[in-house]
Amino acid sequence: MTGITPIKSPVSKSGNVILEEELSCQLIIDAYKRDYGIDVSEYFTGIDNVKIYKCLDTKYRFYFPFSLAGKSNIYEELQKMPGYYELRLEHQIAESFFTPNESVLEIGCGHGLFIEKLQAKGISCTGLEFNQAAVKVGIEKGLNILSQDIFEHSKEHGGSYDIVYFFQVLEHITQVNEFLQACIDVLKVGGKLIVGVPNSNPFLYKYDKYHTLNLPPHHMGLWDTTALANLQNFFSLRLNGVLVEPLQDCDYDRYFKLQAQQLKSQSKLSSMIIETFLVDLRPTRIRRQLQKFITKWVPGRNLLAVYHKPAE
């Protein structure tokens, strides 16, 4: 069922939203248990399906109800996974936007891996992080990491930073409007806001709707290039550009498996060819080169948007 609903967009705060589809709560619960050994059933008490709405003002898509958003305990479990906090390609790309003597704020900094890298360049860094275990590690390394949210931080640090940035954070947020406004408040005029999010169109969502960590309670929003560009219509921001990460080697097999699955109902022969020649069960140099050539223009997992705060 679709149509205008009383649900309000987390971005525009208007009721101009439509219900697009629903996902099975039980399948989500099963996925977390199977893939990570985590029981998330408490989040889904009393509901059978998770709804996905689209904000018609911005094209941002979000999960509902908002009460599904993960609490600190789930992140404490997930941080035990190898690589949950690590430097990614988006960090390498973003690094070019920072220059010495700037004052920067990272929201959701983990234990400060990127902050360490920036401080080595002479950049003054502050980090905000909820995960107490991660905060403890960062402080032990001598980093300025605060157990504080951006709402509290903005009360005393208005116009303080040249750059505010966060990677893999915005998709967890349900209070998107209030969160982004607080980020803008702590920026100096002309300062940059750098936002890294998963690319939910098309790779992470279109063909893999039940990809575990892209579901509640871990993720609450589905961002794409259009939704990111439309933020400047609702906030004091001007978009410098959105960079789309290319598909990475580690995702080739998953990409082709998903393509083969989609083709099964249309062309069993095409599906079989993809599975035989492009799904890398036993890696070979020729197969990897073929995968790389075919996916050269395929968008990858992540997006990086850069904005600036204009003069009023």
Image: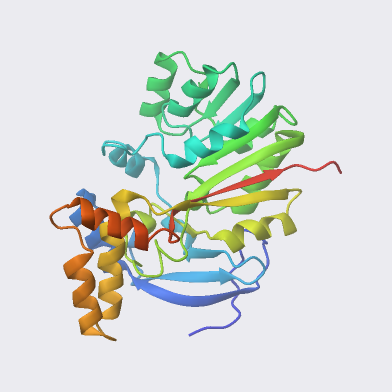
Can residue 10 be seen by looking at this rendering? no
Q: In the image as oriented, which residue stretches furthest toward the front?
A: 286
Q: Residue at x 39, y 54 (%)?
A: 247
Q: Is residue 247 left or right of residue 5?
A: left
Displayed quadrant of residue 280: bottom left
Q: Where is residue 253 in the image (x, y as percent from the top left)?
A: 25, 58
Q: Where is residue 85 in the image (x, y as percent from the top left)?
A: 37, 35
Q: Is residue 112 left or right of residue 305?
A: left
Displayed quadrant of residue 154: top right
Q: Residue at x 73, y 52 (%)?
A: 235
Would you place residue 138 above or below residue 34 in this image?
A: above
Front position in the image: 14 or 108 = 108
Can residue 187 be seen by looking at this rendering? yes
Q: Where is residue 12 in the image (x, y as percent from the top left)?
A: 67, 61
Front position in the image: 35 or 296 = 296
Would you place residue 246 above or below residue 15 in this image?
A: above
Would you place residue 166 above or below residue 227 in this image?
A: above
Would you place residue 141 above or below residue 126 in this image?
A: above
Quadrant in the picture for the C terminus: top right
Q: In this view, does 279 lie to the left or right of 294?
A: left
Q: In the image as oriented, which residue stretches furthest toward the right?
A: 312
Q: Residue at x 21, y 50 (%)?
A: 285
Front position in the image: 38 or 233 = 233
Q: Position of residue 124 (x, y in %)?
A: 61, 19
